[in-house]
Image (tube, coloured by chain):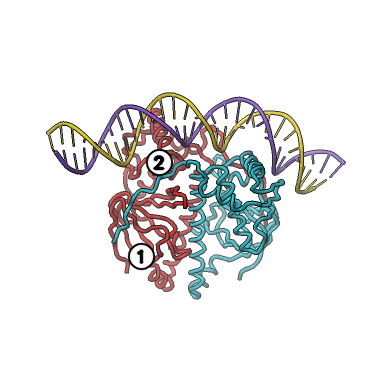
Chain colours: A cyan, B red, C purple, D yellow
Amino acid sequence: MASRQTVKRGTTLFRSGEPFEALYAVRTGFFKTCVASEDGREQVTGFQMAGEVLGLDGISSDRHTCDAVALEDSQVCVIPYEALELLAKEVNTLQQQLQRIMSREIVRTQGQMMLLGSMHAEERLAAFLLNLTHRLEVRGFSPLSMVLRMTREEIGSFLGLTLETVSRTFSRFQNDGLLFVRSRQIRITDPVGLQAIVDGSPHHHRGTAPVAAQQKQAG
Amino acid sequence: MASRQTVKRGTTLFRSGEPFEALYAVRTGFFKTCVASEDGREQVTGFQMAGEVLGLDGISSDRHTCDAVALEDSQVCVIPYEALELLAKEVNTLQQQLQRIMSREIVRTQGQMMLLGSMHAEERLAAFLLNLTHRLEVRGFSPLSMVLRMTREEIGSFLGLTLETVSRTFSRFQNDGLLFVRSRQIRITDPVGLQAIVDGSPHHHRGTAPVAAQQKQAG
DNA sequence: CGTAATGTTGAGCGCATTCAAGCCGGGTGG
DNA sequence: CCACCCGGCTTGAATGCGCTCAACATTACG
C-alpha cells in the first residue's frame, strides 16, 4: 500500500508537469521544493525534513506544479493518492488529518509571504534559522548546532536574497556574537538575540500597513 | 445548513486567533486576507472575489491565522466545518473538491512566493494586474477595464512594495502606453506588453538559481 | 590530488525606500 | 451650495540596502 522509495542526493522525486499520483512522506533525508517560470527563474518554495509531506500541490490539477529535489540521500514513504482517498472515506480521522496537513501548509506559506514581503535581509535569515531550530528540536535534535543541507544560493532563493547577501549576513551575525558559522556548520550562541532581530529591531518595514481600526461584523 | 452573511465594507469576517468554525464562500463583494506579526507589521496575503473560499487556514489549528476584511459591502455563504466534514464522508466528490480547493490555494501561494522572491516592481505589478484580468474574465467581466477595490497601500503590501512604488509604477505603465490609470479606474491597452514584462524583459533577477542538471530518480 | 562547486569578501551601483510636499475627490456640516 | 476636511494618490529628492561584478579562498568529490 504505502511503499518506500530511495531518492539519491541531487535527483528529483517529482518534477513540475508530471502526472500526480502519490503523496510522499519524508522518512529520512532532506528535500527542497522549487518552482520555475518560463524564463528560467527558479524559486525555492520550501525545505522538507523527516515527517513532512511532499506533493500536496499536485492534487489541484492532477499534475505536480513544482520540483522536489533531494538535498541528501533520502527515503520517502509513497502514498498512492487513489488508495488514500478510498481509505479516507472509511477512516474519517484520516480525512481530517489530510485536511489539517494541507491547511498547515497554507499557514506556512502565509508566514513565508510575510517574510518575503516585509522583512529585511537580517530578519529573513534570522527567521529562517529559528524556524530550522524549532523543527530540529521537535525531532529531538540539538536545536543550536546544525549542519545546513542546502547551499547559500538555495537559502537565498528561498529568502528572496542573493547568495552573497546570505553569506554576508551570516558573517555579520557571527561578528555580532549571535552564532558561529563555518561553511555549513552553524552553532547558534544567542537564540534570543536572533528572535529579537525577527520581531522588531527598531527599523521600518516595507509594504506594511499600520493596522487600521476595524470592527468585527456581527453577521 | 449553509446560511448567508452580510459583511459591510471595512469590517472583518473573521480575525486571527478566533476559533475556526466555518469556511466562507464569497457570493458578492471583495475581500482581503492579511496576517500581522507581533510588532504590528501587516502583510496582505490575498484578495478574494466571488466564488473564492475564505478560512482554509483555520483548519490546521482550529483557529483562524489571518484576518479577512471586506473591501466593499459583501455577502458570503457560511459553510459550517463540522457539517461539511459529515457531508464529505457521505459524498466523496465533496471531499475531493475540498482537497482540490486547498491544493489550489497552495499552488497560488507558490506563485506568490515566486513573485515576492524574484521579481522587480514592474514585474510584480504587471503580474498582479494580469491575474486580476484573468479572474474577472472567468467571471464574465470585461478583463481590460476594471475598478480596483483596494488602496495602493494594500496592493503594495500584497506585492511587497511601498504604496509610492506602486503609484510610480502605475504612472510609468501609463507613460509607456500599457494602460490608462485614473486613481482606481484601470484600463489596460496593451495586455501583451504587460505579459512581456512579467516573463522576461531582459533584466537579471534576484535570488534565483539557474536550473541545475538533475536526473529523475527511478525508484 | 586536482578540479569544479561552493563560499567569502570587496567595490560600486541602482532600484526601491524614506521623507516630504502638494493634489484630488468624496463626504459632512455650516 | 460651498467650504472644509481627511483619506487616498501622485510626484520629487535624497538615502541606503541589497544587487552586480569580480577576485579569491575553501570545500567537496571523483
Q: Residue B38 at what x, y percent from top left? A: 47, 52
Identify which residue, B156 or D2, lies in the foreground.
Answer: D2
- The local secondary structure at tag 2 comes to helix
- The local secondary structure at tag 1 comes to strand
For the point 70% across and 57% down, the residue is A73
Identify which residue, B175 or A204, lies in the foreground.
Answer: A204
Is disc 2 in contact with disc 1, using a CB cutoff of under 8 Å?
Answer: no
With respect to residue B152, does B78 lie above or below? below
Question: How many angstroms separate mark 2 from mark 1 (CA)?
Answer: 30 Å
Q: Residue A165 at what x, y percent from top left? A: 61, 39
For the point 63% across and 63% down, the residue is A139
Q: Going by the image, does B195 lie left or right of A49?
A: left
With respect to residue A155, does A3 lie above or below? below
Q: Residue B91 at what x, y percent from top left? A: 41, 71
The residue that mark 1 highlights is B79
State the quadrant of the C terminus of chain B.
bottom right
The residue that mark 2 highlights is B129
* N-terminal label among 2 and 1: 1
With respect to residue B57, does A93 lie above or below? below
For the point 33% across and 52% down, the residue is A214
Q: Going by the image, does A183 lie left or right of D17?
A: right
Between marks 2 and 1 in the image, the one whose residue lies nearer the viewer:
1
Chain ID of residue with mark 2 = B
Residue B146, by quadrant, is top left
